[in-house]
Image (cartoon, rainbow, N blue to C red):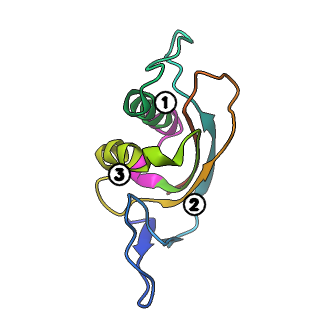
């Protein structure tokens, strides 16, 4: 049973990155709200200091581990909010995101911020998932 459907309305330009203009949750189910994840590994060490691709990959791994613990998978994520220190990293971030969201990616917002909870972090992502 498909719980979500990506929507690409006529009259809205196709996204340049890895996101959908909208995601429709087609059946009632359980919503999971994932906190903002940074590039800390399971020991608490920061992965990829100075490397946006490595940090994005670790953030996505953290999201994946957490959504699986909740009984879902990355395909169940319907929305993400991405906080970045430098929006010029857009293409590198989306290169990594394609690995985790290969089809019907979530709705997405990316915002450039002046800082995160540790100056070594380049990216933080939170998410909402819809589970059956």
Numbered tag placed on residue 101 in the rendering: 3
Write down the residue under mark 2. 29
In front of the other: 67 or 88: 88
Q: CA distance from mark 2 to mark 3?
A: 21 Å
Asked whether the residues under the numbered discs 2 and 1 touch, taking CB atoms below 8 Å apart as contact, a structural biologist would say: no
Left or right, residue 97 beside residue 102: right
Q: Can residue 131 be seen in the rendering of this structure?
A: no
Q: Label 3 neighbourhood size at 10 Å, few (<14), some (14-19), many (20+)?
A: some
Q: CA distance from mark 1 to mark 3?
A: 14 Å
Q: Label 2 neighbourhood size at 10 Å, few (<14), some (14-19), many (20+)?
A: few
Q: Which secondary structure, mark 2?
A: loop
Say whether disc 1 or disc 3 marks the residue closer to the N-terminus: 1
Residue at point 44%, 36% (across, down): 60
Write down the residue under mark 1. 62
| Front label number (2 vs 1) | 1
Give the vertical position of 39 relative to 3 (above or below). Answer: above
Give the vertical position of 121 relative to 92 (above or below). Answer: above
Task: Name the image quarter holding residue 68.
Answer: top left
**What's the magenta region?**
64-76
Left or right, residue 92 beside residue 40: left
In front of the other: 126 or 56: 56
Percent coordinates x, y for residue 39 in the rendering? 51, 25
Percent coordinates x, y for residue 121 in the rendering? 58, 26
Q: Which secondary structure, mark 3?
A: loop
Give the vertical position of 114 relative to 18 (above or below). Answer: above
Q: Label 1 neighbourhood size at 10 Å, few (<14), some (14-19), many (20+)?
A: many
């Amino acid at each position: 049973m498909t719980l979500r459907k990506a929507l690409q309305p006529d009259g809205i330009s196709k996204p340049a990155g890895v996101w959908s203009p909208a995601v429709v949750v087609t059946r009632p189910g359980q919503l999971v709200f994932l906190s903002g994840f940074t590039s800390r590994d399971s020991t608490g060490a920061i992965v990829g200091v100075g490397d946006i691709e490595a940090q994005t990959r670790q953030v996505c791994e953290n999201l994946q581990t957490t959504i699986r613990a909740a009984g879902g998978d990355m395909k169940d994520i319907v929305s993400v909010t991405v906080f970045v220190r430098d929006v010029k990293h857009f293409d590198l971030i989306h290169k990594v995101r394609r690995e985790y969201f290969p089809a019907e990616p979530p709705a997405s917002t990316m915002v450039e911020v002046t800082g995160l909870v540790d100056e070594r972090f380049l990216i933080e992502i939170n998410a909402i998932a819809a589970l059956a």
